[in-house]
Image (cartoon, rainbow, N blue to C red):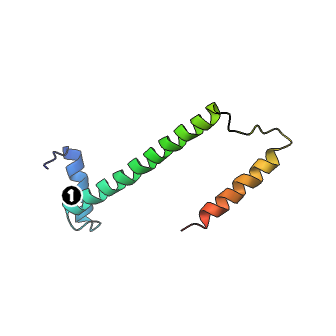
Amino acid sequence: MEVQLTPDQEAFIRKAVASGRYPSAEAAVRDAMARWEEVERARLELLAALDEAEADLEAGHYTDYTNATLPQLADELKREARERRNQP
């Protein structure tokens, strides 16, 4: 595959190689593609989560919280965050 970069993109890559950040232009482009793939995967995961949440709402699978029950919600969210943080 052959790709044409803009002059600004080429200059950006040359600068990264000259600074020693990357050993070659190819390495810089591979890294850029890997980062793009990560962002794209995260975007697709977010869209899937939003679709799932929308389906839950439409099916009535949700909880209404009031001022009285907001502390319970905060505790649940903290617990979930701790569990996620401890996952590999």
Q: Residue at x 55, y 40 (%)?
A: 52
Q: Position of residue 28 (x, y in %)?
A: 26, 60
Report the residue at 21% width, 58% height from top: 14
Number of other residues with Cα within 10 Å of mark 1, as a class: few under 14, some 14 to 19, many 20 or more: some
User: In the depicted view, which residue is nearer to us: 18 or 32?
Assistant: 32
Q: Does residue 28 appear left or right of residue 58 in this picture?
A: left
Asked where in the image residue 83 lies, by quadrant, the reply is bottom right
Quarter residue 26 falls in? bottom left
Of residues 6 and 29, the one drawn nearer to the viewer in this rendering? 29
In the image as oriented, which residue stretches furthest toward the left? 2
Q: Residue furthest right?
A: 68
Asked which secondary structure carries label 1, the reply is: helix
Report the label total: 1
Question: Is 18 rendered above or below residue 53?
Answer: below
To which quarter of the image does residue 6 belong?
top left
Nearer to the camera, 36 or 8: 36
Please say if 67 is above or below 11.
Answer: above
Going by the image, does 62 lie left or right of 36?
right
Q: Position of residue 27 (x, y in %)?
A: 24, 63
Residue 44 vertical placement versus 32 (above, below): above
Q: Residue furthest front?
A: 59
Residue, disc 1:
14
Residue at image x 59%, y 39%? 53
- Look at 35% across and 52% down and name the residue there: 37
Would residue 13 appear left or right of 74 to someone viewing this image?
left
Q: Residue furthest top?
A: 58
Query: What is the three-letter code of the residue carrying label 1?
Result: Arg
